[in-house]
Image: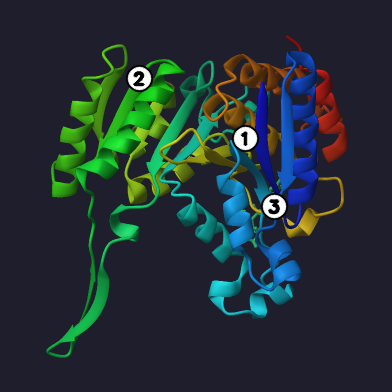
Amino acid sequence: MNFQIGLIPGDGIGPEIVREAKKVLDKVCEVYGHTFTYTELLLGGASIDAHGVPLTEETISEAKSKDAVLMGSIGGDAKTSPWYQLEPSKRPEAGLLGIRKALNLFANLRPAYLYKELQAACPLREDIIGDGFDMMIMRELTGGLYFGERKTVEENGVRKAIDTLTYDEHEIRRIAKRAFDIARKRRGKVTSVDKANVLDSSRLWRAVVDEVAGDYPDVTLEHMLVDNCAMQLVRDPKQFDVILTENMFGDILSDEASMVTGSIGMLSSASLNETKFGLYEPSHGSAPDIAGQDKANPIATILSAAMMLRYSLDLDEEAGAVEAAVQKVLTEGYRTGDIMSQGCTLVGTGKMGDLIAEAITR
Ligand code: NAD
């Protein structure tokens, strides 16, 4: 099959890790007989250097015309980079927020998967980890408290701040559908997280999720209060498959879930809109401290490319082949510096990409 892919190398280690992910995608094309046509797009600091702004209309329209976009990371060292002398709306991060908004990416997906080989990095006890865990946090990204009306006023000499948490049923329905679709591609369970014992927005959330569940009789739905979910993530993370939640709860829970896996260089993510389109990127930043030194771990970006194959291109078998290749290379004991442990073989960014690409088979 033929697909058009946008590539945003970005800043810092971005170009190195995207290069390795492309290497792996090229091998997927070779093994499975697909053709991917790539277009490089500028965002963040790289766009500021070329055009004076972190995001251009050209990048937006090019991205919209693609089947999916794979990104490295953007941004520099805030203390030394001239990008941070600019006003906030012209800095690299404004480009990222801008493209998410322009592409209407309302659903953020972050897997938390514990590789057996990297168990030492997990802060949980061995008996809790068991055979490992594999969950996906789906967070609503463009509504709720972070986008509601807000103001600070002074009444009778007392300062008062107001934030509003608003969701309409359409916003809830569209993300719930994505969560159920994704659960179908996994183990068929959705845990919807809310605070329905207190918040009206959560009671509507729960009602709409129940309605959507009616169209997915093959998927099991459970509701969980957010405070309980925060506890369950460290008490028994194995119970979760897809966690569906609103913006602020998801912000907190997705960080908690990724921390229990322990290694930042391994964490992929996706941001999706109502179509098949998605923007795929590692959860980590541009790591300017190690940029250009062949030290960056490319696995988070390679696993983001696997998510792109599965969720935007519907190439499930190919996505599985990439994940299996990562697993094989870890089992063989190869490690970049950030996940290195005794008895393993230290490799650089390029070598890690080579090894994973070589391990792709049908
Ligand atoms: P960071 O994630 O870039 O780095 C934190 C630490 O983790 C550093 O020590 C770094 O060397 C290490 N690290 C990160 N990714 C790694 C990898 N793949 N392999 C090995 N080590 C890795 O976070 P930061 O230092 O707070 O931010 C640096 C820049 O990245 C800032 O400009 C920030 O705004 C930007 N940022 C961008 C994104 C994004 O593009 N989505 C996300 C977060 C931060």
Q: Distance between the residues labelled 2 and 3?
A: 37 Å
The answer to whether residue 179 is left or right of residue 333 is left
Looking at the image, the residue that sits furthest to the top is 362
Element assignment for label 2: strand
Where residue 51 sits in the image (x, y, percent)?
71, 70
Location of residue 41 with respect to 336 vertically, above or below: below
Q: Distance between the residues labelled 1 and 3?
A: 17 Å
Which amino acid type is marked by label 2?
Answer: Lys
Location of residue 200 with respect to 126 vertically, above or below: below
**Residue situated in front as seen by the camera: 70 or 204:** 70
Which amino acid type is marked by label 3?
Answer: Leu
Q: Which mark is residue 41?
A: 3
Where residue 254 sits in the image (x, y, percent)?
45, 42
**Residue situated in front as seen by the camera: 307 or 282:** 307
Q: Which mark is residue 224?
A: none
Q: Residues within 10 Å of mark 2 (few under 14, many from 20)?
A: many
Point 27% across, 70% down: residue: 150
The answer to whether residue 44 is left or right of residue 311 is right
Q: How crowded is mark 1: few (under 14 residues within 10 Å), some or many (20 or more)?
A: many
Disc 2 under 8 Å from ligand 1? The reply is no
Point 37% across, 29% down: residue: 179
Camera-nearest label, 2 or 3: 3
Disc 3 under 8 Å from ligand 1? The reply is no
First reached walking from the N terminus: tag 1 or tag 2: 2
Q: Which mark is residue 189?
A: 2
Element assignment for label 3: loop
Element assignment for label 1: helix
Callout 2 touching callout 3 (CB < 8 Å): no
Which amino acid type is marked by label 1?
Answer: Ser
**Quarter residue 336 falls in:** top right
